Amino acid sequence: MFRDNNVKTLKAMAVGRSNNLAVIRLICSYFVILSHSFALRYGAEHSQRELLDTISHGSLGFGAFAVGCFFFFGGYLIAGSAARSHTGSSFFKKRLVRLLPELLFLVIFLAFILGPLFSSLGFGEYFGSNQVLLFLLNAILIPYHYLPGLFMSNPYPDVVDGSLWTLPVEFCCYIFVFCAYKLTHFDKKRYLAACSICLIPTIGYLLAAYPAQVSIVRPVILYWLGTTAYVFRDSIRISRKAASISLAAFLCLLAAGLSDLAMIVCFPVFVTWAAFYATPLKASLFLNKHELSYGIYLWGWPMGQIVVQAFPTIDVHGLSLLSFILAGLFGMLGLKASNMLTSLAHKAWQNSN
């Protein structure tokens, strides 16, 4: 990253909750919903394009941008969690407590409440289908997208929650980060040596299979870049000028159709500056205490499907806004329910010991 010795290091800036990270993630959760709204309203093969998709000649949409943001900052934050965890069990316990309770609430609520209410089938036929049980696999990070008779006549039929595919990928990244820490303890030289080994299959993929599975590979690379930023955080300095240059270069590369290069080379610089170096927004104080982006991300797609089913002629921006509001409400409900579930589980664990 760009270096300026007159600017504080990333390690000095990324301390505590005085940052814009929660605001950025909330904006990104809307970007995901906006991007999905085009497909949910017009179908998987829609020709309508969002602004970023138009600028990049179809190579990068707001959804892919947002997922990249989630993964990059995830790599940075989870690296810190690994470094602070004394054991593997404590690390993965924290990760599962963060990931699974809200997901479990979503899956159960969709399968047993919203599913039968919005299904074209009767209750008996709905609950008689093995798809209901298969849908519960989502709670253990095995994606299954269907519920009986749900959203069959929508422009993007059948798929109940198309956002869930990222969760098992994210969990695999947790494993990668923890293994990297155990092998290197984030010593810079040892970390670079380990990364050089991983670089060989990555280059092999890029040479042999690109752009196949780029929607998965690019977020994983960004996760690795986020982890690398954590390892070298005491050497990284990002000035406002460097952030501006990286953003300009990002847009130029997008206009040239080089979105992957833009995301890997330029994107980490200006989003890191925006998160940790820019003056914290007032909304950050609230959002950093009440993290809603994960819940909104989980609920955005099914809320969009429900809105399209209820209002088939709604325009994309109205769909995205209404889906965002509904996802926020259900996300808050899921957060409260998951906190209650986690608290009860913790008390039960303490009592058993």
Image (cartoon, rainbow, N blue to C red):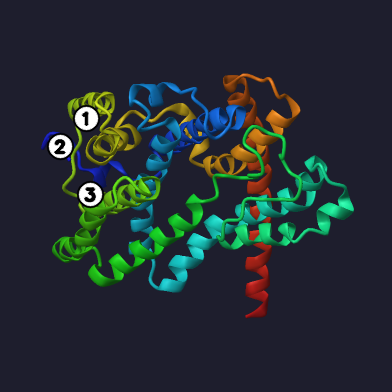
The secondary structure type at the circle numbered 2 is loop
The secondary structure type at the circle numbered 3 is loop
**What residue appears at the point 18 percent right and 44 percent down from the top-left corner?**
236
Q: Earlier in the sequence, mark 2 or mark 3?
A: 2
Badge number at residue 2: 2
| Separation of residues labelled 1 and 3 (CA atoms) | 18 Å
- Quadrant that contains the C terminus: bottom right
Pinpoint residue 273: horizontal percent, then vertical percent: 28, 34
Q: Does residue 352 appear left or right of residue 261 in this picture?
A: right
Return the residue at label 3.
233
Q: Does residue 11 appear left or right of residue 100 in this picture?
A: left
Q: Amino acid at mark 2?
A: Phe
Say which of 353 and 186 sits in front.
186
| Separation of residues labelled 2 and 3 (CA atoms) | 12 Å
Q: Earlier in the sequence, mark 1 or mark 2?
A: 2
Residue 271 drawn above or below residue 71: above
Say which of 74 and 147 sits in front.
147
Contact, CB < 8 Å: mark 1 with mark 2?
yes
Q: Which image quarter: residue 101?
A: bottom right
Pinpoint residue 351: horizontal percent, then vertical percent: 67, 76
Residue 4 drawn above or below residue 172: above
The secondary structure type at the circle numbered 1 is helix
Return the residue at label 1.
246
Q: Residues within 10 Å of mark 3 (few under 14, many from 20)?
A: some
Q: Amino acid at mark 3?
A: Arg
**What residue appears at the point 33 percent right and 26 percent down from the top-left corner?**
56
Choose mark 1 or mark 2, whichever is in front: 1
Q: Residues within 10 Å of mark 1 (few under 14, many from 20)?
A: many
